[in-house]
Amino acid sequence: MGRLGSADVFLFEGFHFDRGSGDLFRLDQAGIAAPVAIGSRALSLLRLLVERPGELISKDAIMESVWPGTVVEEGNLTVQISTLRRILDQNREQGSCIQTVSGRGYRFVAAVTRVEHAVLPASALSPGNGSDGPIARNEQAQGPGVQGQIGSAAPAPTPRRRHRRWGGITATVISALVAPVNWRSLWSGASRPAPRLSIVVLPFTNLTDDREQQYFADGITDDLTTDLSRLAHMFVISRNTAFTYLNKRFDAKQIGRELGVRYVLQGSVRRSGNQVRVNAQLIDAETDAHLWAERFDRDTGELFVLQNEITARIAVALDIEVTGAEAARRREHPDALDYVLRGRAAWNKGSTRDNYAQAIGLFERALALDPRSLDAQSWLASALATRVNGGLADSADADIARAEGLVGQVLAASPHSPVGRWAKGQVLRAQGRCEEAIPEFETVIALNRNSVGAYANLGWCKFVVTGSIGELISLQEQAIRLSRYDPFIGYWYGRMGLAHLLESRNDEAIIWFEKAASSNPGLWDTHSGLASAYALKGDLDRAAAELAEAKRLRGDGRYSSIARLKATGVLGLRGDSMVPKIRALFETTYFAGLRKAGMPEE
């Protein structure tokens, strides 16, 4: 027999939730209990809701219960509600388990049955969910017993699968429910594949004797764990389990087997005088191969600010690296998520017609496999709208219409989807509605502080709407700082070049435009900006060469005359859409330079 379960076990919608231990399981038709990965905040929220089913719980009461003694923005609550809905509503045909009462709070509307003293035979446990889904970690219930087993030479038992039919209401069914269990020992040596996008952030090693640096190293570990858990489909082992590996020697393969993850992130912190060096390495737990490494050298300054910047940069880089690594894993029968990951990897190769076509085709295949996939809808809409904004669409109106329809479906089902909100912002930009796009990008940043594209496009939209060159520069700088090797960094460099050009800082403009051209040689607007800047400096031969390159790349006569360029737009801006002060600056700098470079008026 298994252990005695908590007296506070709740059954609802095919789920088993043990309030005492913090375990959540999904029960399949065979009676196999699959653990569900869920963060501590979402778990606290679920506990409150199932304890009071059918009761309207105010937002203030929820915030006080889930974030006791802490002042947090309401957006944190909507993120956790969205997380629970994504888990609990997966197979629900009508509505959500969690009802929103506008302006007041939330109500748990699913039927809840409370079970006293449920006992489970240990042999009925399943170490996974039968697919590649998340694996729960019973962090709080493991206790010191788990730590005592780490590195033990004795092999952990492999659980047997006992098939029981789910559907009865007798004690026989209740006995098939799962009790708290040491999941690490169950997973050790298991052959089941680890979930896609699964990772553990090992405690960063402090390589100095400075106690303050230990806090800094631990803070990086904590922040990375939190930031990575915000990424869609990213399953992150909790810091409690990760810290059981502190000061212990293990190879990545062993950790991957014990924790059931595909990727291991490890790092170190060293301080020398006023310099702090942070090293980070991403390792494939299946092959022990190093996939990515980065070193960060900074002045100590304010350690908290430095910690935030470093963790954000690592999180952004890992999102790209892990997505690419997963996309490269070929599966015999790929599902919708596989095609979404492959599409994202294709998109991350850079902004070209071919890359967009490949990414959009893969997102379409994902949608064909699962027409209700919010991921496929969101990423497809994003790619279509971004292709239009980059001037790479063969049929801009068709792309915008398709993207707008997809975004409507996504946000109707998941109003707080970061990718859905990002896609809406891109659609609004493509429609020339930058003022309406601003709150969308601000919402994306509230949901995911590391959304570099949201920072960059927020800066562009504020520039378009208000003419603020300062905000354009500062937000591009923030995106560049967080993602130095971003596939879209060429656009951000180009915007920096334009900002300096408009303020007659031609030398600085050339530096940024040259960076943009080096990052992505196919950006025609970059070469037109270089033509203008070089001409204003008096280098007319170089200016003429850059103008010729812009004409060649564009290929449609846009750069044949000043009048044609004003009518078709510069970087998505037409003269009639510019605020007056920006229109005046374009005349005295950008267009003046192109005239000197040889562009005729008509």
Image: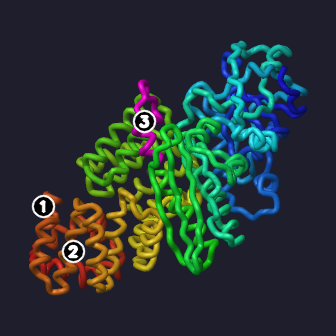
Please identify the quadrant where the C terminus is shown: bottom left
Tell me which amino acid carries mark 2.
Leu
Q: Position of residue 73 (x, y in %)?
A: 68, 62
Q: Nearer the viewer, residue 358 or 408?
A: 358
Q: Which residue is mark 2?
A: 530
Rendered residue at 78%/14% (across/down): 168
Please name the residue that numbered disc 1 is placed on: 552
- Side of 449 relative to 157 (left or right): left
Q: Amino acid at mark 1?
A: Arg
Res. 195 in view: yes
**To which residue does mark 3 refer?**
329
N-terminal label among 3 and 1: 3
Q: Amino acid at mark 3?
A: Arg
Q: Residue at x 29, y 70 (%)?
A: 515
Q: Which residues are magenta?
A: 321-338
Q: CA distance from mark 2 to mark 3?
A: 41 Å
Label 2 sits on a secondary structure element that is helix
Q: Position of residue 179 (x, y in %)?
A: 80, 28
Which secondary structure dominates the residues rendered in magenta?
Answer: helix
Q: Is residue 273 magenta?
A: no
